[in-house]
């Protein structure tokens, strides 16, 4: 009997054929029609649904809504299926420890049963969630990320400094595999400030000639401050030319300036799905990787599709996860909106704006929906001397909800600046928000920027 190992299961020839990268992207998809793309999606979706019906998690989820196998005939029927989120996965883990009943390994014949590549979420908000992959789904994710890194300008000659977390967390391992397997660059797996002290990271970058940084923008920006504290000029003494990051509250301009003019590219994904969308040199929004995903943008309250160009929750169906843990209508609760108009690359992919906040982190203040990351981005853009660090606090007094945005700035906290920023927020957002100006580093204990991949941006004192 032939050996069914990782390399066999990943199906290397099919990966090369089905997910072009490097010199083949976007050229291989230019001129492909939306109809042709849809036909491919339909074929992949049929395989995913057939797999899903063999998985107990989906049998329970869909059966509870009275859905039977013949009810879902194609992607037009996708909204008939209930979406699920992390809380449903964690309930599955609690009922069927330790991996839950969503892995689907038992749906395969024993001789073709894929191994499980196992990681977890960080668990900073509770019990870590298992993140499960098979060899094929893992390498599709890796290849899609390499696709966007290569399109952004990363090459085999780069030395890539990574500030993603490692340990049980998926992030750092996923990024390392993408760079090693499909880009071929040298990789420095420094991790977070807890794994490798920030000052030590600067010396590692200097010693080994880092030319690119990957990670979350908040900490990448923090490293530029540490570099200066250690006597190095970012971009000159440490000649970073490329940053591929999750921008969050940082703007491309501010992050580029912090590192001496490095090119900055944004991308979006979650631990379960891998990369969903990424930015290219066209700078026209993030290209949704629609040869691998179906992305719905839905109203957070109703779950119904929003009109084009309207904010909504991202609900993702992975069209390639037919080995381990099929993902069918996973609600990330991350908010974005679609970018309208034809794709300037000449490919059939829709585009979206970046990560704009979380619907479960949204604050409704006197009828206005507010996202802390959006507030922070406005403040950092408008406040001279802003370090990029902020946190929003919500409280209730005398039956009235109030929010104060705390912002770190260099230099004196002038009342005039505070008044200017409060007026700007009132004009841009249509609601009164207080601003408190703080000294550099004073918010670190609250945001946990040194220890978390995603710093805390909201403290709700009402809860």
Image: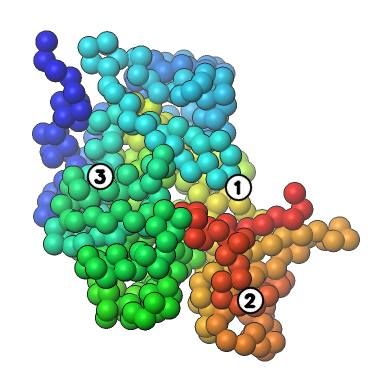
Of residue 80 and residue 280, the one placed in the foreground of this image is: 280
Q: Which marked residue is nearer to the observer: mark 3 or mark 1?
A: 3
The quarter of the displayed image where residue 296 is located: top left
Question: Can residue 227 be seen from the camera position used here?
Answer: yes
Q: Residue furthest right?
A: 398
How far from the left and from the top, in percent, is residue 277? 34, 51
- Residue position marked by numbered label 1 in the rendering: 360
CA distance separating discs 2 and 1: 27 Å
Q: Residue at x 20, y 48 (%)?
A: 180
Q: Residues within 10 Å of mark 3 (few under 14, many from 20)?
A: many
Is the residue marked by circle 1 packed among few (<14), some (14-19), or many (20+) residues within 10 Å? few
Residue at 64 percent across and 85 percent down: it is 413
Image position, residue 221 (x, y; %): 42, 69
Query: Is residue 76 at all visible to an observer of this figure?
Result: no
Residue for badge 2: 438
Q: Is residue 283 above or below residue 347?
A: below
Q: Spatial distance from mark 3 to mark 1, Cα to Cα? A: 31 Å
Q: Is residue 356 above or below residue 418?
A: above
First along the sequence among labels 3 and 1 = 3
Q: Quadrant of residue 445?
A: bottom right
Q: Is residue 445 left or right of residue 167?
A: right
Q: Residue at x 24, y 47 (%)?
A: 178
Answer whether labels 2 and 3 touch (C-beta < 8 Å): no
State the colouring used for the structure image. rainbow
For disc 2, the neighbor class at 10 Å (few under 14, some 14 to 19, many from 20) is: some
């Amino acid at each position: 009997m032939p050996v069914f190992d990782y390399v066999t299961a990943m199906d290397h020839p099919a990966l090369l054929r089905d997910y072009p990268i490097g010199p083949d992207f976007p050229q291989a998809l230019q001129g492909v029609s939306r109809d042709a793309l849809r036909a491919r999606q339909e074929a992949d979706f049929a395989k995913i649904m057939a797999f899903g019906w063999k998985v107990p998690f989906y049998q329970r989820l869909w059966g509870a809504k009275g859905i039977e196998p013949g009810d879902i005939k194609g992607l037009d029927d996708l909204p008939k299926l209930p979406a699920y989120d992390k809380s449903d996965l964690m309930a599955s883990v609690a009922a069927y420890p330790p991996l839950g009943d969503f892995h689907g390994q038992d749906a395969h014949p024993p001789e073709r049963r894929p191994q499980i590549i196992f990681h977890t979420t960080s668990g900073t908000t509770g019990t870590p969630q298992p993140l499960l992959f098979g060899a094929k789904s893992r390498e599709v994710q890796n290849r899609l990320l390499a696709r966007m890194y290569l399109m952004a300008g990363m090459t085999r000659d780069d030395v890539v400094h990574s500030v993603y977390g490692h340990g049980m967390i998926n992030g750092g391992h996923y990024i390392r595999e993408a760079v090693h397997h499909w880009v071929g660059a040298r990789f420095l797996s420094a991790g977070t400030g807890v794994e490798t002290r920030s000052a030590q990271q600067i010396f590692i970058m200097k010693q080994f000639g880092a030319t690119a940084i990957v990670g979350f923008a908040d900490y990448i920006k923090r490293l530029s401050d540490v570099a200066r504290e250690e006597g190095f000029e970012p971009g000159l003494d440490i000649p970073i030319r490329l940053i591929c990051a999750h921008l969050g509250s940082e703007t491309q301009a501010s992050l580029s300036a912090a590192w001496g003019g490095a090119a900055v590219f944004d991308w979006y994904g979650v631990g379960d799905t891998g990369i969903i969308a990424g930015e290219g040199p066209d700078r026209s929004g993030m290209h949704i990787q629609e040869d691998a995903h179906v992305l719905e943008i839905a109203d957070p309250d109703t779950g119904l599709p929003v009109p084009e160009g309207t904010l909504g929750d991202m609900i993702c169906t992975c069209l390639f996860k037919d080995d381990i843990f099929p993902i069918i209508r996973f609600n990330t609760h991350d908010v974005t909106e679609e970018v309208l108009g034809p794709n300037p690359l000449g490919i059939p992919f829709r585009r979206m704006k970046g990560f704009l906040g979380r619907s479960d982190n949204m604050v409704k203040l006197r009828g206005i929906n507010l996202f802390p990351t959006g507030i922070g981005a406005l403040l950092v853009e408008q406040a001279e001397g802003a370090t990029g660090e902020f946190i929003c606090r919500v409280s209730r007094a005398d039956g009235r909800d109030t929010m104060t945005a705390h912002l770190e700035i260099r230099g004196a906290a002038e009342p005039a600046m505070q008044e200017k920023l409060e007026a700007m927020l009132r004009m841009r957002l249509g609601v009164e928000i207080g601003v408190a100006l703080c000294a550099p580093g004073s918010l670190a204990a609250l945001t946990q920027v040194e220890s978390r991949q995603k710093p805390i941006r909201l403290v709700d004192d009402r809860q």
